[in-house]
Image (spheres, helix red, strand yellow):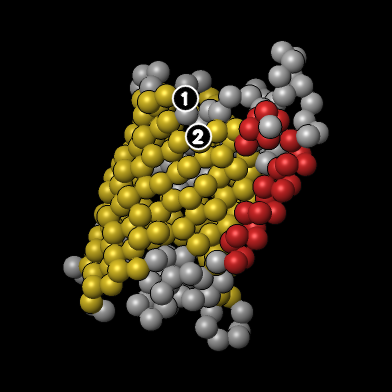
Amino acid sequence: MRSLQLAVMLIFLAGCSLSQSQGPTSSGESACTSPAVSVPTRPTVTSATDTTQCGVVELEYGLERQWPGAGANRDDLTGGLRFGITQNLDFHWFSSDFVHIMDGYGNRTGFGDTWLGLRYRFLKQTKHHPSLGAFYVAKVPSANLALKLGTGQVDHAIYFLASKDISRLHFDFNVIELLAGRSDPSGFDHDTGFALATWYPLTHRVSAVFEPYGYTTLNADSPAFASAMAGFNYRVRPRLYLDTGLDVGVSSAAPRKRVFVGVTYAMGNFYAFLRSR
């Protein structure tokens, strides 16, 4: 966990220096010290190019149950923090704080793996082209290996992001390259994921989302699969969002079903707090 603490400390120290150099907006207010507003990423697998609001610390958690098949099930409480470093760059820390698995190995409960990442938007959308970005995450193997709650290896994932608004619809598309560490010194297993999320506002508070996604074959234990998710996102306040949904396997190798609920909350603007001090 020392690596996690160091990463968080470095990000916040960088934020301190960046917050001193942010210029004012046309209204006289710094672009990175404006009131906190949530930019939810749940409930999709797909990551949008929109980054966490500059200076804002955002909390995100979800509880899910998955039925992989063959009588097995998995409960997972996953979440963490996101921090907007600049208007186009944010930091991600998330982990499986609680994992319970019942399968052929028996019942096991423990802590899951931890992921650290940076997302960067390098092109904003216009009428003629989408916004584009990249997202890199690395897994810190914190799960209990003896209980088979993780692989015990460091993994890397690179997301290529594209987002576009067309009329009332919003689209997010990802190509995901995953490098999964092996227990032997021969390097990594590799697969490619594809995900497309479509958002449609039903009311000024409720949005429906539909998302097909899938991955190519990773190794002998993880064949290619395809799934589809349908869910809803509800804006309680600009700082607070709730979500729920259902995920079903499309191909035979996909997990059979997954249900989930989640919350996203913008805790406050860290840069504004520093400036007020």
In the picture, the quarter occupied by the C terminus is top right
Compared to 75, does 149 lie above or below?
Answer: below
Q: Which residue is identified by label 2?
A: 266
Kindly identify the residue that appears in the image at 23 percent across and 73 percent down.
Answer: 107
Res 223 → quadrant:
bottom left
Kindly identify the residue that appears in the image at 60 percent across and 67 percent down.
Answer: 2
Amino acid found under the numbered disc labelled 2: Ala
Give the tally of numbered discs: 2
Q: CA distance from mark 2 to mark 1?
A: 8 Å
Kindly identify the residue that appears in the image at 45 percent across and 44 percent down.
Answer: 60
> Label 1 near label 2: C-beta < 8 Å?
yes
Name the foreground residue: 10 vs 156: 10
How far across and how far down the image is residue 217, in percent? 46, 68
Kindly identify the residue that appears in the image at 29 percent across and 59 percent down.
Answer: 75
* Residue 101 visible here: yes
- Horizontal side of residue 64 vs 170, given as left or right: left
- Horizontal side of residue 150 vs 164, given as left or right: left
